[in-house]
Image: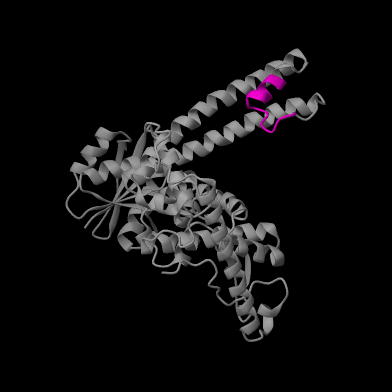
Amino acid sequence: MRGFGLDVHRDFCEVAIAEDGEIRSAGRIPTRVASLELFAQSLAAGDLVAVEATSGTDKIVSVLQAQGVRVVVANTRKLSAISEAKAKTDRLDARMLARLLVSGLLAEVWTPDERTRALRRLTNRRERIVRARTRAKNEAHGVLARNLCERPPVTDCFGKGGRRWLAELELPVDERLTLDGCLRQVDFLDAEVAALDREIAKQALAWPEVLRLMSVPGVNVQTAATFMASVGDIERFPSPGKLVSYLGLDPRVRQSGSGPAHHGRISKAGASEARHMLGEVAWKVMQTPGPLRAFFERIRARRGPQVAATATARKLVVLFWHLLTREQDYAYARPAMTRNKIRQLELLAGAPSQKGCKGIAGGKSRAVFDAERELSRQAEIAYRRLVSDWHSSRPKQTGAGATAGRASPTRSQAARQTP
């Protein structure tokens, strides 16, 4: 078996070969599809290729795998032999990749399939566009603040009523040009977000796992799609703790010698998009009756709202793992709300409107929604009673766990999916 190391650049790839205990350079090949296909066809059965995770890695992996080549994507965060080397050149980096590959010391990164890659690109682009739109809106608000304008009389400053109010303001010429330019940017970015939402909706309707996650109140298609795009195959994670660590929601741990372990802030490793989206959902969950809101309020009473939001995001990850591995919907779901979410997806994907037809959206009557909300409120009350009884019946703790303001070391069964 031979091991090949590819140091990837924008225009070329430096190649090194490890064979029979020797490492040698093999020149460069262009970073183009045709050249990569010729390189893959020159390999023998059983050869391995190692590449670093970079911007063009996904395309390189797909081209090589289409030719039947086994590719190992190296984790750049664990390549200290390359990043911290005293002598660092393209040839030396490729040789080090080949050496680590054949020795079995190369930390591998999971490579998603094409469907997950496509959804990941869509969700990442949507997040970048939303951030650009937010910057344009903030710049428009800055114009109003610099000119000491009154607060807008409407909730949405960029809606129809807000646009009329902005058009009537008396502003200097330069400030008016800035404000009008911001409004044009917002209109353009709104159209881009709508186009991406339509494509994401089409893919979500064909992805049962995304629809299953949407059964949790407060979780919309953007949260579910971003989560699945970041995680991919849930079978890769044997336990919910592994998934929590993958998304960077586990606390950092420092311990040495006989001293106690110190748990700090979350590691923030992995995909930041999914972690940010889960943090936003945590704040939305607290507005919906149910066990998750009771969990949020219980943590907030002891540790504050920010820690409670992070803990709720972690709880959501554990819940998602149970839903996907057991292939079950959320036990405390609100069926009418879930059917309404799916119907909105269908309309967004281009399904014809059928107003007036009964049963299309799953019974959008106020009575049904109120009844489901009351059941969720009863589930929240039952959770609070369960936690209260558990606290009163558990043995008295000693040590660090009994310190006020610290999280208990005992695992809680809160908001867990039950059969």
379, above or below 371, in the image: below
| Residue 313 % position (x, y) | 56, 57
- The reply, left or right, for residue 351 in relation to residue 39 is right
Q: Is residue 268 magenta?
A: no
* Quadrant in the picture for the N terminus: bottom left
Residue that protrudes farthest toward the bottom in the picture:
395
Residue that protrudes farthest toward the top in the picture:
173
- The reply, left or right, for residue 226 in relation to residue 116 is right
| Residue 117 % position (x, y) | 37, 43
- The reply, left or right, for residue 151 in relation to residue 219 is right
| Residue 140 % position (x, y) | 69, 26
| Residue 8 % position (x, y) | 38, 42
Quarter of image, res 299: bottom right
Q: Is residue 158 magenta?
A: yes
Nearest the viewer among 253 and 242 is 242
Quarter of image, res 243: bottom left
Nearest the viewer among 246 and 26 is 246
- Residues rendered magenta in the picture: 153-165
Nearest the viewer among 303 and 43 is 303
Nearest the viewer among 196 and 100 is 196
* Quadrant in the picture for the C terminus: bottom left
The answer to whether residue 140 of the structure is visible from this angle is yes
